[in-house]
Image (spheres, rainbow, N blue to C red):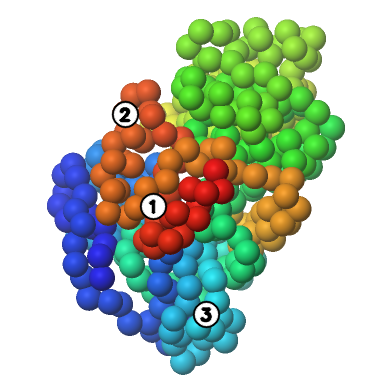
Amino acid sequence: MKAIVKTKRGKGLEMRELPLPSPGSDEALIKVEAVSICGTDLHLDQWDGWARERVKNIPQIIGHEFCGKVIEVGGSVTRVKPGDYVSADSHIPCLFCIPCLRGEHHLCFNLQILGVDRDGCFAEYITIPERSLWKNRPTLPPEIASIQDPLGNAVYATLVEPVAGQDLVILGDGPIGLFATGIARAAGASRIMLSGLNPLCLNIGQMMGADHVYHAGETDIVKAVLGETKGVGTDIVLEMSGSPRAISDGLTLVRKGGRFSAFGIPSRPVSIDFNEQIIFKGIRLYGINGRRMFETWFQMAGLLNSNRLDPRPVLTHYLMFDEFEKGFLWMEETPRQAAKVVLFLDPHLFKEAEGRR
């Protein structure tokens, strides 16, 4: 099979021919139909500080966002069967540690992540433990089915509490911030304000339902949002960038008694005035890690099935699998030339997806 592999501890990826994997007793073998490029994949390609410290196994197939058809199952698998159309949560929990036994599988002590701790999905075939598989409705387009892992991040961050009728600020215009914009609009948010640095992405944010967009390099975000909210601040802040400045701004902007969802991962320690920004404001601070398995997936399926949420404006580019280098280049350029890139392994599915644009 063809696979995109991290072959060395340095910049770059390679397309390799590898043997097909065989499913273990608790696994399914899946023929992959589409995959999407994530920020984690960019870290692995660039072999930055995070990748150097985090990834232990080289060579390794990368990727963790996909959809495909089950073609074989192990002897103990009961929940899926050959022919099922599936995606997977990229988090593979052990099921036996304290967080898992408490139903918090996404916080597993022994968590494995596809494409990071074990071979990923950027290949023609992949084996996945049954416990991480999600069965898609048969009519879900593969370009959407393949991006449910990051879409789920946005669902969890946005809907960890209800948003209906509330003002909301999203800090960060990457794909997950853009998905969150559409989710907040579908879930009935009153006023959505989005900030970021990329004009392409800010335009997509408007398409996804943002009422106000701000270029963070040209606008004083704190002044703009406090002006919109008459000095009160916003009910909800979704921090999706990891920028220390954005985190500080977000804690300033969230109103007293408001909610702050922290998803973006800072590259360096962040200084917070715990008394003034958290305790005395009485805010609710949520750390967002992955997706709740599978509560988040049911919420996401409900939004997609209702047709109230269409994430496709964020999917700016479709390519065939062999053209992966072009997709990585677009996403690594400054400013980036693509919000989200989907790679198709089947030319027929690629042509159909292009026809749905």
Instruction: Locate residue 148, reporting x and y percent.
Output: 55, 54
Which amino acid type is shown beneath numbered disc 3? Gly
Residue that carries the numbered disc 2 in the rendered image: 333
Identify the secondary structure beneath mark 1.
strand
| Residue receiving disc 1 | 343
Q: Which residue is outermost to the right?
A: 165
Bin the neighbour count of mark 2 within 10 Å (Cα to Cα): few under 14, some 14-19, many 20 and up: few
Which residue is under mark 3? 83
Label 2 sits on a secondary structure element that is loop
**Image x and y of residue 183, in percent:** 68, 41
Q: Residue at x 19, y 45 (%)?
A: 12
Dot 3: few (<14), some (14–19), or many (≥20) neighbours within 10 Å? few
- For the residues labelled 3 and 2, the Cα–Cα distance comes to 39 Å
Identify whether 102 is placed above or below 6.
below
**Quadrant position of the N terminus in the picture:** bottom left
- Foreground disc of the pair 2, 1: 1
**What amino acid type is highlighted by mark number 1?**
Leu
Task: Reply above or below: 280 against 102.
Answer: above
Residue 275 seen by the camera:
no
Q: Which callout, 3 or 2, points at the residue further toward the start of the chain? A: 3
Marks 2 and 1, the one that precedes in the sequence = 2
CB atoms of marks 2 and 1 within 8 Å: no
Query: Which residue is more in the foreground, 23 or 273?
Result: 23
Quarter placement of the C terminus: top right
Viewed as shown, does residue 155 lie left or right of 74?
A: right
Which residue is situated farthest in the bottom direction here? 75
- Work out whether residue 17 or residue 269 is closer to the camera in this orientation and state it: 17
Total marks shown come to 3
Q: Earlier in the sequence, mark 3 or mark 1?
A: 3
Q: Amino acid at mark 2?
A: Glu
On screen, residue 233 versus residue 202, left or right, reads: right
Q: Is residue 101 above or below residue 22?
A: above
